[in-house]
Amino acid sequence: MRIVLVALVVGVAASVVANMATTVYLHRALAHRALMLRAPAAHAFRFVIWVSTGIRPRQWVAVHRKHHAFTDVEGDPHSPVLHGWVKVQMLNVAMYRKEAKNPRTVERYARDLPPTILDRLFYDHALVGLGVGVASLVLLFGWQVGLLAAFVHVNMYLGGSAAVNAIGHHFGRRPYDNNAGNLQWLAFVTAGEGLHNNHHAKPTSAKLAHRWFEVDPGWGLIKSLTWLRLAKLRVMTGATNASAQRVGEQLPVDEVVEERVDVAGPGIAVVDVVGVLPDIACEHGVRAVLQRQIGVPR
Ligand SMILES: [Zn+2]
Ligand SMILES: [Zn+2]
């Protein structure tokens, strides 16, 4: 009994760490460039993702950006509107893997993240990373607790990620006009990702809680990283009340847009970097900048 309890605690803790790295590093920093991470923090997150999930960031980023580009229409890698929420909940991993293995998706949506030498040597070998993760748990806690904790973590992490795409695109409050919902319980499980209606409304906001009663655990970590000067916020457009408005260091909107266009690369239509650009573009009337840079229709 004691073994099961300890394994539960360790497994949940591992899942919390993996979810924090997923939302802050993979999602908010890499996919949407809502914040910049300094090298020590970026390397630490990269390592945590490798040993706790085996995910290749450029694949995750590409699949996710495509989800924003085709939300709940043909082309969305994992839409409950197309497949039903139960199917997406059960098959989210398979749907993700199918899209992640498509080289055209990665080429088109994650061209700002080419493989590095560390990727080739270590991080692109998912099974090695997961092996290091499980071996660490076994060394620290013994084989029974270690293996059981790994089992708890895998189920919690995959279940939570699937729930954001399935339950989070079917149930929940919808203060903004989009297909995603806000579910606070899911936000606790996924370090903030459950506030998915807010996220689809303002994809480049580093903070997913937009109202005083919403809690975004990932934002707590981001604030701590900014205090430690390990992270820098890029832009906050998620503001619907004073407390959420324009926090931290900012760049002028035009500069952010131009930089993000550079990230996306020439010839990429604005719809392909949805989540990186349009909310800023629309709110601040900077379509002229986009037009100049990538030929977006006025
Ligand atoms: Zn979504
Ligand atoms: Zn997103």
Image (cartoon, rainbow, N blue to C red):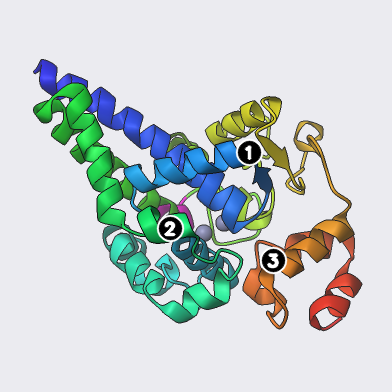
Q: Position of residue 180 (x, y in %)?
A: 53, 57
Residue indicated by mark 2: 119
In front of the other: label 1 or label 2? Answer: 2
Residue 276 left/right relative to 120: right
Kindly report the distance in space between the C-alpha atoms of the residues bearing marks 2 and 3: 20 Å
The answer to whether residue 168 is magenta is: yes
Instruction: Please name the residue that numbered disc 3 is placed on.
Output: 263
Residue on which disc 1 sits: 209
Quarter that holds the C terminus: bottom right
Q: x%, y% of residue 293?
A: 83, 76
Q: Decide if ligand 2 comes within 8 Å of the CB at mark 1.
A: no
Compute the Cα span from label 1 to label 3. 26 Å
Residue interval drawn in magenta: 167-171
Is residue 174 visible to the viewer in this orientation of the structure? no
> SS class of the residue under badge 3?
helix
Q: Which of pointers 2 and 3 lies earlier in the amino acid sequence?
A: 2
- Residue at (71, 83) in percent of width and height: 267
Amino acid on which disc 1 is placed: Ala
At horizontal 71% and vertical 75% (from top left) the residue drawn is 270
Q: Position of residue 154 (x, y in %)?
A: 26, 44
Q: Is residue 111 magenta?
A: no
- x and y percentages locating residue 227 in the rendered image: 69, 25
Hey, what amino acid is under mark 2? Asp
